[in-house]
Amino acid sequence: MSDETSTVHRIQDFDGSDRPRERLAQLGASALSNAELLAILLRTGLPGENAVQVGHRLLKRFGGLTGLHKISFEELCLQKGISTAKACQIKAAIELGNRLPRENAEEKPVIKSPKDIADLIQYEMIGLPQENLWVLLLDTRNRVLKIEKLYKGSLNSSTVRVGELFKSALTNNAASIILAHNHPSGDPTPSPEDVALTRAASQAGRLLDVEVLDHIVIGQNSFASLKDKGLGFSN
């Protein structure tokens, strides 16, 4: 059929100035919208819906890039116009972004501030659909030796075994640890349970001679440092 509504819209069918690939080549990737970047991955749209419009639809349906990060591969494949190949391309691109902060594996990240912690783990953590508790192990120069992913689900001082937070630190001769967990709601405000867990961990750390440097709560493009807020840490 030659009817316009039955035409599959390809990126090369756009006017030259509107083609995402050409705009990226001329202006750089940072100049493109999220929908345009998705369009480059998708390459083709649907009858009556070009690739950029498909990108807009996906972003609206799932609440932005974070939503695309969180949904399962199977759910993505169920979306109109998203084949297995296109879903693979989207998930692969997201995973590349996730791995970028850890590209130089031999260069241990150095933690100098709460922002350094957030920069290291936030991308991956905001994509988690439920609460996760991680423990960062640090050496005497505040270099990250390892990240232990310990707990998944509702977190509080009664369900988390404080001794487990230090098990790997003692095995790996870590000088200190940093606790980090996410709030899937997007609000990083520490809860009373977060404060209680921090207090219990800090007290245990003093007994074990492994200092708890901080407890970071990751939200939607934001984070909170319990150390900076003076919550759970005694002076």
Image (cartoon, rainbow, N blue to C red):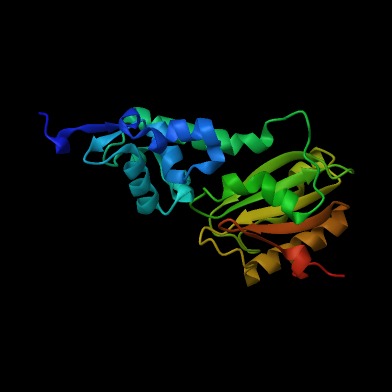
The spot of residue 24 in percent (x, y) is: 50, 34
Residue 163 appears in the picture as rendered: no
Q: Is residue 17 left or right of residue 212?
A: left
Quadrant placement of the N terminus: top left
The spot of residue 226 in percent (x, y) is: 73, 64
Relative to 160, say whether 137 is above or below: above
Near-viewer residue (179 or 35): 35
Labels in figure, total: 0
Specify the quadrant of the image occupied by residue 179. Answer: bottom right
Residue at coordinates 73% horizontally, 53% vertically from top-left?
A: 115
Residue 53 appears in the picture as rendered: yes
Q: Is residue 69 left or right of residue 217?
A: left
The spot of residue 64 in percent (x, y) is: 44, 51
The spot of residue 156 in percent (x, y) is: 62, 63
Relative to 159, say whether 88 is above or below: above
Near-viewer residue (58 or 106): 58
Residue at coordinates 85% horizontally, 40% vertically from top-left?
A: 173
Q: Is residue 234 left or right of residue 100?
A: right
Relative to 51, say whether 203 is above or below: below
Specify the quadrant of the image occupied by residue 85. Answer: top left
Q: Is residue 86 left or right of residue 128?
A: left
Residue at coordinates 74% horizontally, 49% vertically from top-left?
A: 116
Residue at coordinates 87% horizontally, 70% vertically from top-left?
A: 235
